Amino acid sequence: MIRLRSFLLFHAVLLIAPLSRASDPPTFGDPLSGLTAAEAAAFAAGKVEFAEEDGIDEGLGPVFNERSCGECHNVPAIGGGSTRVETRFATITNGVFDPLTQYGGTLMQDHAIGPADGSPHQFLAETVPGAATIVAGRRTTPLFGLGLVNATDDSTFVNLAMQESLLGDGTAGHVAYVTNVNTGLRDVGKFGWKAQVPSLLIFSGDAYLNEMGITNPIFPDESCPQGDCSELQYNPMPGLNDDGSGVRAFRDFMRLLAPPPRGPITFEALIGQVIFSAIGCDACHTPTLTTGSNAIAALDHQVYHPYSDFLLHYMGSLGDGIKQGDATRREMRTAPLWGLRMITTFLHDGRATTLHDAIVAHDGQGKAARDRFIALSAIEKSYLRAFLKSL
């Protein structure tokens, strides 16, 4: 089948080339183009907040993962990803997924404050409890361009799921419906490995609490270290740590962060783009989406190229075993591929160190595309790699 398609490759290149070019895009870590002075100032202030290390006088801890967002999100610039892998754990109790909340699950905070930080009490970092039978890693993902995803109407993802279902090829994803903790309503989840977060504002509040231990109006309750809430009696900052201004600053930085610029587009990359589509990768890694109406002109009806449908897909053995939000243990949100050339470890837990290994590990609804990839010739695989490394 691949041999027969090769006759069409050179002609198809002419059709896809306009979708592959961008004129003078921002570089990694830059703000969106066309911001007003006020929007640019909000981005700059948010970036400072994002990169700044917090201390216990600002509510850090008692348990946390890092002292600033920038410690994890820094490759190749502030707002990017990294090889940092966090740990989640759980078990199955009487046939039902059990997040082991009595042990602080499912997210493990691997740092804790102590006398060196000015705390009179030595808190202990969390560990994987012996009761856990499921342990999963979660790699830090880049934040570039997520403001565009945030500005895309929920109906776009609902319609995309319907379109995928109508194809009937067995790869259709489904929308993750999650509770918006601000409104109590069910919204479309777009962010996180399990599409468990519906907006960048909630993403910010969640990160403030769960990654740094800083309570805020969206998430006002402190995490109990290893599930032991009696430890909170020693918490040096027991009140509300952030009044919401820090959360909004994080949101502003992410919302106005430009998408990854496209790398050099070679002739081999253009052929690889056709192969990418021909073997079915774009069934889940949707190349192009469009934002809805937005008061920020730089986010208003903007066409962007994330190479993701942001839907949940059944991934079989590649699922991480964690049930979260609307996602089952074997479902994962399609990872965006834009900016892929700056990523050095792949898949949700960073287990793959080559694109080849990452593709071959696909299972479930990704299995058919994986098998077509395996059937490619060596030269066709090289073209596909050239395309992926141009993203």
Image (spheres, grey):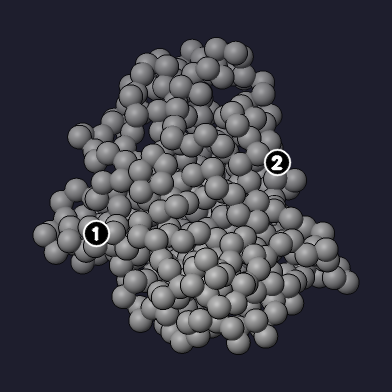
According to the image, label 2 marks what residue?
363
According to the image, label 1 marks what residue?
43
Count of picture labels? 2
Q: Is residue 148 left or right of residue 203?
A: left
> Residue 245: which quarter of the image?
bottom left
Q: Looking at numbered disc 2 in the image, what kind of residue is underneath it?
A: Asp
Q: Give 42 or 356, whichever is nearer the viewer.
A: 42
Q: Give 76 or 236, whichever is nearer the viewer.
A: 236
Using the image, determine if residue 72 lies above or below residue 16. Answer: below
SS for tag 1?
A: helix
Which circle's residue, 1 or 2, is located before the other in the chain?
1
Q: Is residue 213 visible?
A: no
Question: How packed is label 1: few (under 14 Cα within 10 Å), some, or many (20 or more)?
Answer: many
Q: Position of residue 312 (x, y in %)?
A: 59, 55
SS for tag 2?
A: loop
Q: Position of residue 303 (x, y in %)?
A: 30, 47
Q: Looking at numbered disc 1 in the image, what kind of residue is underneath it?
A: Phe
Q: Which mark is residue 33?
A: none
> Residue 264: which quarter of the image?
top left
Q: Quadrant of the C terminus?
A: top left
Residue positioned most to the right: 94
The residue under the point 44% across, 32% down is 341
> Residue 193: which quarter of the image?
bottom right
The residue under the point 42% across, 42% down is 75
Q: Is residue 52 left or right of residue 193?
A: left
Q: Is residue 175 left or right of residue 257?
A: right
Question: How packed is label 2: few (under 14 Cα within 10 Å), some, or many (20 or more)?
Answer: some
